[in-house]
Image (cartoon, rainbow, N blue to C red):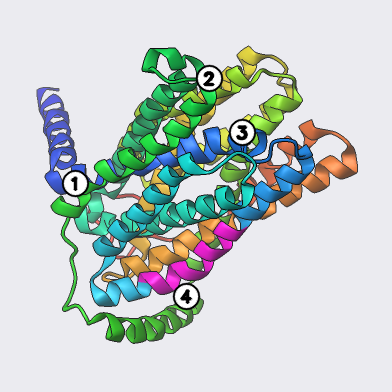
Amino acid sequence: MADAVEAVAVKTRGARGVLLRRPVVGWALCDWANSAFATTVMAGFFPLYFKQYWNAGVEATESTFRLGLANGFASILVALMAPLIGAIADKGGARIRLLALFTVLGAAMTAALYWVSQGDWVTAAIFYVAASLGFWGGNQFYDSLITDVAEERDYDLVSGYGYALGYLGGGVLFLVNVLMVTQPALFGIADASEGVRLSFVTVGVWWVLFTLPVLFWVKERRDSALPMSAAIRAGWRELLGTMRYLRTDRTLLWFLLAYWFYIDGVNTIIKMAVDYGLSLGLQQASLITALLLVQFVGFPAALAFGWLGKRIGARTGIYIAIAVYTATAGYAYFLDTEREFFALAVVIGLVQGGVQSLSRSLYGRLIPEGKAGEFFGFYNLMGKAAAILGPILTGVVALTTGDSRLAIVSISILFVLGALFLTRVRVEGRHQAAGSSP
């Protein structure tokens, strides 16, 4: 018994030591930094302000179309450029430099929203697309750097740590921003509208400030870097070679297909939750509270899933998250009250960071060594492409049945298909660290 207790203590100290290493802390703080954009801007204030301020007096359907157009254009840009830029970054040893470039782009464009005049939806959309490009482009290189800051046996733990800090950091700033809007006098702000616009500036500053540690503390593991012009030519050749490689690597193909389906289900629930709550007659303040719940529950839950993945394997942890999501989609059919909506938010917060972090760590085990930027480009492409099936599925079901509740339940199909394809993924023999289960 004493030996078992000592073994647990040694493992605990070992895990703590990994998470306190400077490169790991710097890498994880990058998630703390950019999650402010995902929470305050993408999920929180931009959709509301775009409709109520930059599209003031415009029909709701027209403003929704404009927002969808901006989101769709940003997604297409990221999906098309991600694999090529990743290949170029690998050849040029430039992942950290490109992370810095995309961070500055995203932060500057976000802060610039402060100066966009009322009714000027075109400029607001352009700045938002550019900021989204900075966010998703930077995330590609941030994700790929996990192979540089951690050993394979620690991928699950470190990936969960990053997502945990992301949920916490995004939640902390979003809480401050909500107070700036709901109680502007506390901050010496004129009104709620000024509070929203200043929130965009705080996101830009926060994003840059907390990205600095990864730029100074993380070193890429790379071979000799090529000059940029040669890296571009080599990147094109590498991209074509990667596409040929993917056709022959069944394990990677099965994972990317599985990820496409189940992460589409995750993204659809994220995007549909607020709209579904509004359709049930819930108040906007309650929906913001639910979003904050997801953030703060997601912090310890992502850490827990990182530990769980290290103990039982990343793939098993993903199965657990998929099962919870499937049950959640079914439960949503019967949802009627704010209390039930809050309960749903807590459950989603428990698994959202887990499925994201373990997917990243499992994929990191599957890709060839030395090609992280390039292959995480394809990972990013699949993540962005996974914003198509869910909305179409829910729209068709709602249209044909006339029941928005059945539309939510239909999302479970995506989770079931993702789980089935995931059963075909084999991790054994792919430079797997001792003690990591498939």
Nearest to viewer (mark 4 / mark 2): 2
Residue at 47 percent of width and 20 percent of height = 190
Crowding around mark 2 (Cα neighbors within 10 Å: few <14, some 14 to 19, many 20+) is some
The type of residue carrying mark 4 is Leu
Identify the residue position indicated by label 2 in the image.
Answer: 289
Q: Position of residue 306 (x, y in %)?
A: 33, 39
Quadrant in which residue 166 is drawn: top left
Distance from Cα at disc 2 to Cα at disc 1: 31 Å
Q: Which mark is residue 213?
A: 1
Q: Amino acid at mark 1?
A: Pro
Q: Is residue 73 left or right of residue 433?
A: right
Which amino acid type is marked by label 2? Answer: Thr
Mark seen at residue 48: 3
Q: Secondary structure at mark 1?
A: helix
Q: What is the magenta range?
A: 73-86
In front: label 2 or label 3: 3
Callout 3 secondary element: helix
The quadrant in which the N terminus is found is top left
Q: Position of residue 200 (x, y in %)?
A: 44, 37
Does the CB distance between marks 1 and 4 fall below 8 Å? no
The answer to whether residue 435 is seen in the rendering is no
Question: Upstream in the sequence, badge 2 or badge 3?
Answer: 3
- Crowd tier of the residue under label 3, counting other residues whose Cα lies within 10 Å: few below 14, some 14–19, many 20 or above: some
Closer to us: 317 or 329 = 329
Say which of marks 4 and 3 sits in front: 3
Question: Does the magenta run of residues contain 83?
Answer: yes
First in residue order: circle 4 vs circle 3: 3
Which label was assigned to residue 405?
none
The amino acid on which the numbered mark 3 sits, given as a three-letter code, is: Leu
Please determine whether, in this image, residue 5 is positioned above or below residue 200: above
